[in-house]
Each structure stands twice: as C-alpha cells, then as structure tokens.
Amino acid sequence: MGIEILRHIYFRIPVLIRLLLTILLVMLSFGILIHFIEPEQYPTIFDGIWWAFVTGATVGYGDYVPVSAAGRTIGVLLMLSGAGLITFYISLFAASTIKYERDLSKGVISYKGSDHLICIGWNERTKKLVEITLKSRPKMEVVLIDQSLTHLSYQHFPIHFIHGDATEDWTLKQANVKKASKVIITSNMSESEESADKYSVLSTVAVRGNNEDIPIITEILTKRQIKNAKRAGATTIIRPNDFMSTLLYHELFKDKKTKPFESILALLHEQRFIHLPLPNTLYNCSFIDVLTFYKRKGFLVIGIIRDGKWKINPNYDFLIQDGDVIIGLGS
C-alpha cells in the first residue's frame, strides 16, 4: 500500500522535477556504491557522489578514477544511464521552455500573480493603454483577456494573454480576477454599438460576480446601456462617443491658433485629475483663495463638484461651501 501511494505521488509530480529527482537518485546510488567498492580511491561518500556527477555529466576531470574491474563496470553503467538521463533532462527542459512560451502566446496559461491590471478586449485603445501604463509603471503586471485574438507574442507585448470569453467564470479564474487590482473593459468596435455594449455589460456582471470589491472601468457606447452597466456593477463608466463628440465640436468652432485635441492629449499625458479634500479653513472662502492654497501644494484647481453638478472654472469670487469636492490636476 505504501509503495502504491508513493508511485501515485511520484507520477503526479511535474515531469521536469520527476526527472531531476531520478537523476539525483541515480547519482547518489552510484556514488555510494563506488565508495563501498573502492574505499581507498573514494575515501568518503561525497567523493563517490562527486565522481558520479562528473562522470554522468561526461565532464571527466580525472581526479577520481576506478581501478578495479567492479569499479570500472560501475563506471560504464553510470556512463550509459547517467549521461542519457542528463541529456534527456536538458532536452526536456529546453522543450518545456519552448512549449511554455508557445502556450503563453496562445493564451492557455493561467496567471498566478496578484495586484495586476486586467484588460478585457484587444484593440488600438488597449495597445496604447498598455504602452502608457508600462511606461509610467514598469512594475505593473497586465493581463489581457480576448477571445478574437489567437496569438500574442510576449516579446512584442510584455503582458500575460488569456484566450477566452470574459463573460465566463473559467476565463476570469484563469486571469486570477479575485486577486486583481482593477479591471478595464473596452468595447469591441468590430461589432455594432448595441452588441458591443451588451458584451461589456455581461463582462461587468461576470467580473463583479467573481470579485465584489474590485474597481471596474467599463466602456459604454450607447446611452441606453449606461444604466445597465451601473446595475451590473461598473465602478466607472467611460462614454467615448460623448467625449469625441465634444472634442469634435471644439475642433469645429475653435480659434485659428487654438489646438483643442493636442492640448487635451498633452494634459492627459502629463497630468492626472484628482479630487482634493477641502480643509475646514477653506469653508466659505473664494475660489481664488482655494486655487492659491492648492497651487502652493503643486495642484491646479479647475473647478468643484456640488450636489452632483460640475462647476468648471467658476468666477474668482465664487464661495466654496462645506461638502464641495475640489477638482484638481496633479502630476
């Protein structure tokens, strides 16, 4: 019964580790055996084990040499078995490395890390997002989930690719969503806006079902799906159509020397929007006083949020009240 259990345990061990254990066992056995057969040539067991590894690896330093017929027979057996095992191990290790890289590119390897960013959907926006993220946060681990992509080279994009449907629990488990820090769901522009939004909402439901606390940023194209995305558990909803329409309006009716697109792009690259706390000392102070206070701390105040309404660039004498949220920019 004990041998049967050991056999089951042995064959459950990964093949590389199993082969390494076999090599160690063979080398130890031959080393101990040669020590007892020729104790004068191999005074200690360690000397015998050293000779076994040197001979098995076909290095052959010549510092220990068997002199008896029995010892040389042991040496021949070691050369035949040990060298073959080591060669096979090296070949298997190389093949396993190549297979792992191939499987990683195909998206069939589960992610085991934590505090990572999960991106759902592979498109030009995701590519740019990954590029910016890794440039500003080189240590950030990014996991991509996409079902249309069949291959993604890790050498070209240093992210962990998971091939699968983000609406399925198994795919999310492969991405280790329970230990992720954030999830961003981008729309599939190859589908109709309605179909893309439905998939985004279903993905949001699946992610929220697997992790109740994780922040989810969901891209929604149509207004009628915004409420559904909120019900599904989206923490933040990105509306690219509203943003682009507003930007196009500014481009249409801009002054000749004004560059709205370039200005916003530079702003978003170099600065971050921040909601700043309002100290008690700034209650009932004017907007210019609040702006001056935070500018000395390295933040640029551009407006406030009061009762859910945004007030951008109010008058200099606009009074700040308790409960107002300060909107600022910081690097």
Image: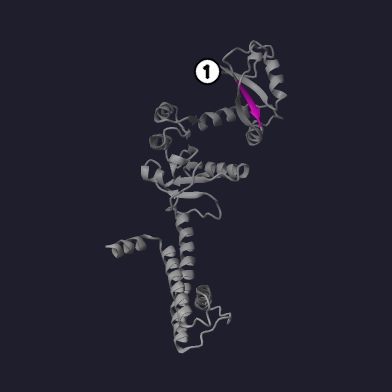
What's the magenta bit mostly, secondary-structure-wise? strand
Instruction: Work out whether residue 277 or residue 329 is closer to the camera in this orientation and state it.
Output: 277
Judging by the rendered image, the residue that carries numbered circle 1 is: 308
Instruction: Classify residue 11 by image quadrant.
Output: bottom left
- 67 relative to 265 in the view: left or right: left
Residue 222 % position (x, y): 45, 30
- Based on the picture, tell me whether residue 96 belongs to the magenta stretch: no
**Residue at (51%, 55%) from the top-left corner?**
153
Q: Residues within 10 Å of mark 1 (few under 14, many from 20)?
A: few
- 317 relative to 134 in the view: left or right: right
Residue segment shown in magenta: 326-330
- Based on the picture, tell me whether residue 328 belongs to the magenta stretch: yes
Identity, as a three-letter code, of the amino acid under mark 1: Gly
**Residue at (48%, 42%) from the top-left corner?**
118
Instruction: Classify residue 198 by image quadrant.
Output: top left
Residue 100 shows in this picture: yes
Please identify the quadrant where the N terminus is shown: bottom left
Residue 50 % position (x, y): 53, 74
Instruction: Work out whether residue 8 or residue 109 is closer to the camera in this orientation and state it.
Output: 8
Please identify the quadrant where the C terminus is shown: top right
User: Could you tell me which secondary element the residue under label 1 belongs to?
Assistant: loop
